[in-house]
Image (cartoon, rainbow, N blue to C red):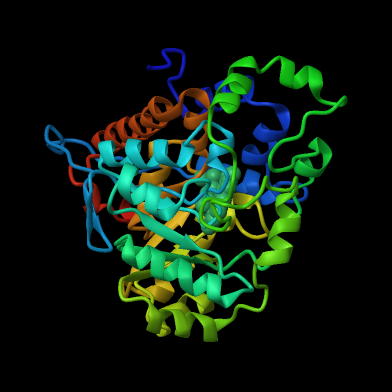
Amino acid sequence: MKLPQALTIRDLRLIAQDKLPRSVFGFIDGGAHDERTLRDNEADFAAMRFAPRVLVDVSQRTQAVELLGQKLRSPLILGPTGMAGLLWPHGDLAMARATAAAGIGYCQSTTSNCSIEQIASEGRSDHWFQLYVQKDRGITASLIERARLAKCPVLVLTVDLPLQGPRERDVRNGFTIPPRIGLDNVFDYASKLGWLWRMANGPRITFGNLDSATDAKPKLTTLTARIAAQFDASVSWKDLAWLRAQWPGKLAVKGILHPEDARLAVAHGVDAVIVSNHGGRQLDGAPSAVSALPAIAEAIDGKVDIIMDGGVRRGSDIVKAMALGANACIVGRAGLYGLAAGGQAGVAQAISILQQEIDITQALLGLPDLSQVSQRVIF
Ligand SMILES: Cc1cc2nc3c(=O)[nH]c(=O)nc-3n(C[C@H](O)[C@H](O)[C@H](O)COP(=O)(O)O)c2cc1C
């Protein structure tokens, strides 16, 4: 079902806000501390200006790229985002299916609600898997093995979350997993009947990759508490070397902002570096991802692929990131707003909006083949 009132990702965001309880919307929309980095991610894209060329034949256009051995119809991957099942029942599956239909990439999170096996059998067979190293290295090893058995072509190691960033919106809104209805928020929930109905009829919210199917009813908890208890804050470059030796497929490291870390990652044998500040959800005051990109592109000097994420709300943002050296972009919230607004159809709409915006941008820039984009398109 298409949402006719949504022309843009920002429209989908407003619909998501309307449909979700305040605490759940705050969880996807919010960032760390004063949310400066969150805002800068978008503002620094908005401040860039194009340098269009004219009288170029743009009657035939392609935005297809090859990335980490996969052919993508657009330079776009729906990023790893935990707890998508809180937005729509089987939210991870909806994202896997919508991305497969649109010919773009999909990366499943360690903290997704569906399991790796469920995505591989019911969603798509070539999804990427994102790893958070767990204190229990047995669990970590088993996640890697499950991703290998599920034939995930790419493993993404996220390195910017030794502890969860301080999300004050979540604390103020009393966000817990599963969400809790109390006297303080009962009126808010009562105004979200569609969401309540879907959740009541959907599957129980569990961490599909971490909870055992036979676990008793999960305890009400904050994500921060769960992460502090289970995620390993001691992870270092030694662990990346270990992982490189374990993992036979393509390996990407996500959360790089410093050129020296980019060089170290390449020296450790990664196949791609993901320039990211976790969508402004970790260190507030970190640079916007797009402002960190040029120095990293220079450090990497074409040795491995570069993916960037953070603040992509328009197809033109993706073109700008590619002009500065990215091979593709991940989107987090753009897909989540679509998911909350309309399930799989809403995700498909978010992707289609971005694809159409890329297309018109490259046409008006005089750029028939997006893979040939360079810094010349930026003033
Ligand atoms: C609700 C939410 C959950 C996320 N969960 C994860 C996660 O489990 N693993 C991860 O590597 N990144 C996670 N991220 C970060 C995204 O992968 C991505 O880096 C970020 O959303 C990009 O910024 P954008 O939302 O502005 O596109 C999450 C982001 C959001 C908004």
Residue 157 coordinates in the image, percent (x, y): 48, 67
Q: Residue at the spot x=54%, y=75% of the render?
A: 138
Q: Residue at the spot x=51%, y=24% of the render?
A: 341
Q: Residue at the spot x=36%, y=34% of the render?
A: 351
Residue sitting nearer the eye, 365 or 370: 370
Q: From the viewer's perspective, is 114 left or right of 372? A: right
Quadrant, the N terminus: top left
Residue 80 in view (yes/no): yes
Residue 44 in view (yes/no): no
Residue sitting nearer the eye, 79 or 367: 79
Residue sitting nearer the eye, 374 or 245: 245
Residue 64 coordinates in the image, percent (x, y): 21, 47
Residue 233 coordinates in the image, percent (x, y): 67, 73
Residue sitting nearer the eye, 281 or 325: 281
Residue 16 falls in image quadrant: top right
As drawn, 302 above or below 51: below
As drawn, 121 above or below 17: below
Residue 117 coordinates in the image, percent (x, y): 38, 53
